Amino acid sequence: MGMLKSFRIGRVGGVEIRADSSLAIIAILITIQLYGQLTKPGNFPGLSHPKAVLLSVASALLFFASILGHELAHAAMFRARHIPVSRITLFMFGGATQAKIEARVPADEFLVSVVGPLTSLAIGGLFLLIRQARLSSLSPQLEYLLRDLGVVNVTLAIFNLVPGFPLDGGRVLRSIVWKVTGSPATATKVSARVGQIVGLLLIGFGILLTLKSGQALDLWLALIGWLLYRAATATLMDVHRRQLLEAATAGEIMAPPPPTVPADMPVAAVMQGYLAGHDGEAFPVMEDGRVVGFVSLRTAQGVSPDRPAREAMLPPRGVLEATPGERMDAVAGRMEQILNPTVLVVDEGRLVGVIEPEDLSRYMTTGTKLTPQPGV
């Protein structure tokens, strides 16, 4: 849901744990709220301010430990389903467990999603059970904080089960629709649409609650709704993007190739036949059916006119190769790994086209495929 810069705080069970910088904001707010409740006149007479601060900080830490427990449950289920986990990140509105690959079957999605809220429910129940036991060693302040932690965790469990993507409940809904339709894309669309509706409802309810109570703190619910709506909308856009990429091949997206320069062509011939009048433009240098570099006016200057083009070229950094029939989702995935990538589309050793980032952007914007070149 749009995290800021995060930093590493440790590892649990081999899983990296990171904290988003926004976590500090909610930590301070929770501590201040708890301190205010503990020191409110008439609530706990005789409680010293240092002890109130200590209890507030400890309670806030237990709250974040509860969120971490929720996310560790997700990670444990990912591993139980043989899906590797890269990291857990805690942030202002909860946490996110990032897997290295997506769920492969609906059962993976269902089990991984449902275990988080169930864990929060169990943690909340444990806090309430300890408080209900009324152990003689528990002070009234501890009983109050245990009840608070219990209620908050149970509330989080219920809220997370709301069927709006990307909440856990939305992912549960996605797994069910996926099972029924057999289409993960359709399932994601349905759950994301529900996520948008839930987000709008939360925004409206948060605004109405604020107008009724007059307390700006009630806008928190509207903010959560807005972030949920944004996340669901981004998911829908991602599904659309994936479907566009899956529906096209490199041969349908590529632009015509620039003229190629034989590697053994003298620099004088390259200057006259290719580079004259083409300041700033680079031409691919071919040798044994492969692009081995790029030559431009800048790289050729200072090289003896009788030397071959291979001695005036730069190596092909940031250059990828694809076949005309390769699906664009695979090509785009490789392009994302490189800064300013260029994809050379090669068919049986012959350069038949080029894909630059702007070619991909054009297709994603218009959805229009180019007519394949003759012979492709």
Image (tube, rainbow, N blue to C red):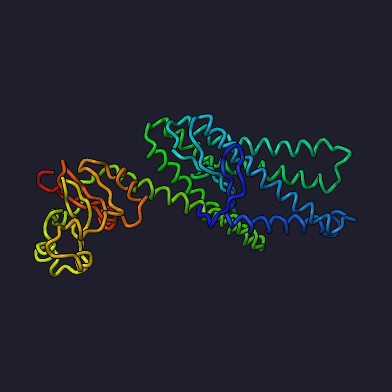
Is 297 on the left-hand or right-hand side of 123? left
Q: Which is nearer the eye, 372 or 144? A: 372
* Spot occupied by residue 285 in the image (x, y as percentages of width and height): 18, 54
Seen from the viewer's position, the closer of residues 249 and 131 is 249
Foreground pick, 149 / 216? 149
Residue 196's spot in the image, x, y percent?
A: 47, 49
> Can you say which quadrant of the picture contains the C terminus?
top left
Q: Residue at x 59, y 41 (%)?
A: 71
Q: Quadrant of residue 74?
A: top right
Frontmost residue, 265 versus 127? 265
Q: Is residue 320 left or right of residue 225?
A: left
The x, y position of residue 133, in whole percent, is 82, 35
Q: Residue at x 10, y 44 (%)?
A: 375
Q: Report the residue at 60% width, 43% height from top.
A: 11
Whole-percent x, y for residue 15 in the image: 57, 40
Report the number of numbered marks: 0
- Residue under the image location 20 percent in, 43 percent down: 324
Compared to residue 241, the image places residue 133 above or below, namely above
As drawn, is 266 to the left or to the right of 226? left
